[in-house]
Image: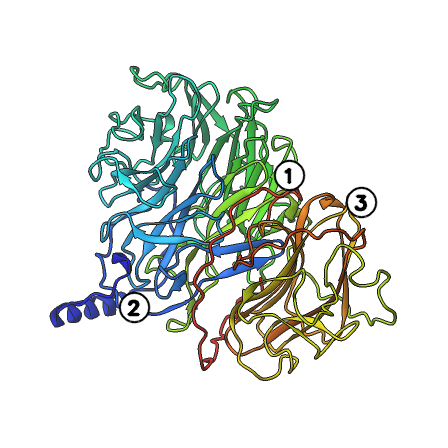
Amino acid sequence: MRTDMSYFNVSTAKVVICLAFLAALGTASGQAPTWDPHTKKPLEKYDNPPAYIFRLETSPRMVSPYGGFISYQVNVDANGNNIVGDAANECSISVDPTNGSKMAIGWRQFNSVLSNFRQGGWGYTTDGGVHWTFPGVLENNVFRSDPVTNSNETGTFFYLSLLQTFCDNIYRSTNGGQSWTELQADGLAGGGDKEWFTIDKTNGPGHGFQYQSWDTTTCSGSGQFSRSTDGGVTWMTSIAIPNLADLGTLDVDTNGNLFIGGEGDSNNVFYCIRSSNAQIGNQTPMFDQVTSVNMGGVLGGGGINPAGLDGQLFLAIDRSGGPTNNNIYMLASVVPSGRSTTDVMFARSTDDGLTFSAPHKINDDPVNPNKWHWFGTFSVAPNGRLDAVWYDTRNAANNTDSQLFYSYSTDAGVTWAPNVAVSAAFNPFQGYPNQSKIGDYITIVSDNTGGNVAYSATFNFNPSRNQHEEDVYYVRVFPGGQKATPTPTPTPTATPSPTPTATPCDSGIIINGCFETGSFSPGWVIDGNNATPVVTNTLSHGGVYSAFAGDAPDGFCVGGVEALGDSSFYQQFTVPAGGGTLSFWYWTCTTDTIQFDWQDAYITDSNGQILQTIFHQCTNNQAWVNQTVNMAPYAGQTVRIKFLVHEDGFGDLTGMYVDDVVLPGTSGTPTPTPTATATATATATATPTPTATPTPTPTPTPTPRATPTPRPQPTPRPRP
């Protein structure tokens, strides 16, 4: 058990003190007034001391599919379960550029929503974000905030965080974020409120240098910028930034020039500020170019995020080596003139920051003064593609429930792809840890096929507080997702089967596609055993048998006990050179009325990574439906057809029959069937060509409740 989440044995006197403290908090937990980012008031300050935590409750971790995307909860306990009663937000992600399956996320960890005392939480993954481990906090019972993580070109991770003194620390990890080493005593890395840092990854004289900037609430009062020439261990005396520009980020171009983005502290003007000599270790950095940038508005605070920012400025540089190399890009959620809500705006420079384009609005919905597009952030992929994500309320009748949205650009930001929602909707006003905000930012790191996003959302419901909780999530976004609808796939129209399928079952590529052996053998692999899929003669489309995933196949989802987890099976095969059309029939049943269960079909690669979501639904067709899939994009590749039913263990049974799975082609030696493993549904990739990644290690599955308890339903979670 981790020390930061432990059950403490304390004296009776301490218990009385603790209860009195929590009672006082409860009377003062009303919504805080909105915050103005242009005042001198700091965003982060020490208010509550550490609180004693008495908590044993857990619930299953949240896995939230939406369209072609899947969000995985990051802040989980040692058994992979959600921690009931805590809060986590303001998350920053790093990805190992030498092994994209290794990532780390830092966040503000609140052990109890009754206290705003926060610590430096972190989690890591080794399987591409499907499963996460949360070992604890950087220092137990030490106030930390504003986490920022980064990776150098060799995969060494760094974690910067703010202390209550407004000084900060750098931590380093050489094992993918599994453990961290503090590089200096607390507070000796300089710093100030809303600090950010970047690393020089070029081959120039500044290679490995770290650069840090912050806002006007400083640690020492001497300035807003510092540099480390020894990998973050020691830091120079801070110096001032022109125009006191703050609330932004930094980056380095391929020539080693440092660029800082921010908004002027007193004039609300955005700036791109260059230092050409920061890369020279024996020289004091000088800022030799200051360019004002029109972002189409100003930064806002409060509003939809009452005690925090509605978004900060992000600056990033193209280092692709191609025609767009060293382009400088700036993005922010800003309040346009005459508005009180925000849009995601973008500007670019193609001349080393000397001039910038006119601002471009990335959110493509019609201008609506009641809609928010907030926490906008972006990154530049190694191939020059731009990926942007943000929270968006365009689909909310109440104008505040938010979804994570995504868009990308392949022409240096001149045009952007149609926006697509990549998460279910959530209420941003719930789960406040005695502090009325969900942090101040989210982050993304891109590779050549997609982007890795760390964000906060309130999908988990806490029945003891009758509201949802703030948690940290990981989702992979990718250009192929633009083909997905921003809402779940509509229920197909049930089609009767008057005649047999054109190609006789088992005469093509798929082995035992009609299940007429009376079992899954040969050909099929069971990889989800909650509940274990079966071959049954209860119902069939053609012949005697069909396969069933889910619960109660003999009762058509009537009666029985619902399992908790995934029931799934797949077959691996090589797609013919001509591709062809895969066809199958399915019959769905469910008694779920809130849609916490689902029925899915996928095309995956040989490691279980999703290449295509055929459908994601929770339907009660009770009729055979035919589904076809064009396999031309996967011609010559080894792939899997996978069927999955997910259930939440609350007693509302869900299931799916599958029959007559056919792919025409010359039948030959089947692709060797891999050994069955409990492979979780993996992250989608951008192209049909799979990228080999290790098979995810299964998360231990919680034991289902013997007697399902009534599910709280004051604010049902929208179906993913």
Q: Nearer the viewer, mark 3 or mark 1?
A: 3
- Hey, what amino acid is under mark 1? Trp
Characterize the local packing of mark 3: few (<14), some (14-19) or many (20 or more) Cα atoms within 10 angstroms: few
The image position of residue 689, as x and y in percent, is 65, 42
Dot label at residue 416: 1
Residue found at x 35% / y 65%: 85
Residue found at x 30% / y 15%: 283
Please indicate whether residue 45 sits to the left or right of residue 657 in the image.
left
The image position of residue 178, as x and y in percent, is 35, 46
Q: Nearer the viewer, residue 578 or 433?
A: 578
Q: Residue furthest bottom?
A: 559
Vertical placement of 152 versus 440: above or below?
Answer: above
Quarter holding residue 269: top left
Residue found at x 64% / y 78%: 553
**Residue receiving disc 2:** 55
- Hey, what amino acid is under mark 3? Gly
Please indicate whether residue 632 sits to the left or right of residue 269 in the image.
right
Q: Secondary structure at mark 1?
A: loop
**In which quadrant is the C terminus drawn?**
bottom right
Q: Nearer the viewer, mark 2 or mark 3?
A: 3
Q: Secondary structure at mark 2?
A: loop
Gap between marks 1 and 2 measured at Cα: 46 Å
Q: Nearer the viewer, residue 68 or 51?
A: 68
Q: Secondary structure at mark 3?
A: loop
- Hey, what amino acid is under mark 2? Arg
**In which quadrant is the N terminus drawn?**
bottom left
**Residue receiving disc 3:** 578
Gap between marks 2 and 3 measured at Cα: 58 Å
